[in-house]
Amino acid sequence: MTKRDLVMRISDETGLIQEDVKAVLQKSLDYIVEALEKNESVEFRNFGVFEVRERKERVGRNPNQPEHVVSIPARRVVKFKPGKVMKQRITGA
């Protein structure tokens, strides 16, 4: 599903204009990214939690040339932990 698909679906179900739905959706995504930039977690009950974690520096190797060692620098990554309801719906448990 793309952002466009989501906008069209919400517009069809609510009767709102697609441009308005797109503006609200884009602003929501912008605020999520802004919070993650500030190292804040973003939680949606029953959906999940987005949070930024620090990945440690590590050593990488080329499988075709194992003697060639490359240092992979530390970096920030976004992790997503699904909520209880999402887990249940996806796994069926």
Image: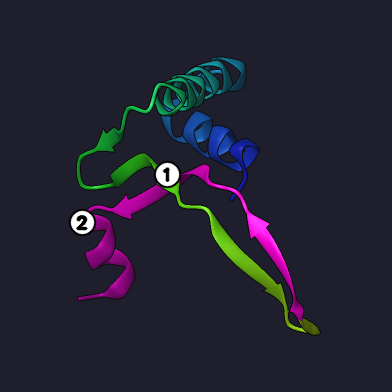
Residue 87 horizontal/vertical position (percent) = 26, 63
Q: In this image, 33 relative to 22: left or right?
A: left
Residue 59 horizontal/vertical position (percent) = 59, 65
Between 25 and 50, the residue placed more toward the observer is: 50
At mark 1, the secondary structure is strand
Between 45 and 81, the residue placed more toward the observer is: 81
The residue drawn where x is 38% and y is 50% is 80
Q: In this image, 84 relative to 36: left or right?
A: left
Residue 37 falls inside the magenta stretch: no
Judge whether 64 appears above or below 12 on screen.
below
The residue drawn where x is 53% and y is 46% is 74
The residue drawn where x is 31% and y is 53% is 81
Residue 84 falls inside the magenta stretch: yes
The image quarter containing residue 41 is: top left
The image quarter containing residue 70 is: bottom right
Q: CA distance from mark 1 to mark 2?
A: 27 Å
Q: Residues within 10 Å of mark 2 (few under 14, many from 20)?
A: few
At mark 2, the secondary structure is helix
The image quadrant where one finds the C terminus is: bottom left
Tag 1: residue type?
Answer: Glu
Query: Which residues are drawn in magenta?
Result: 67-93
Q: Residues within 10 Å of mark 1 (few under 14, many from 20)?
A: few
Which mark sits nearer the N-terminus, 1 or 2?
1
Callout in the foreground (1, 2): 1
> What residue did someone put label 1 on?
54
Q: In this image, 52 relative to 11: left or right?
A: left
Rendered image: mark on residue 44: none
Rendered image: mark on residue 85: 2
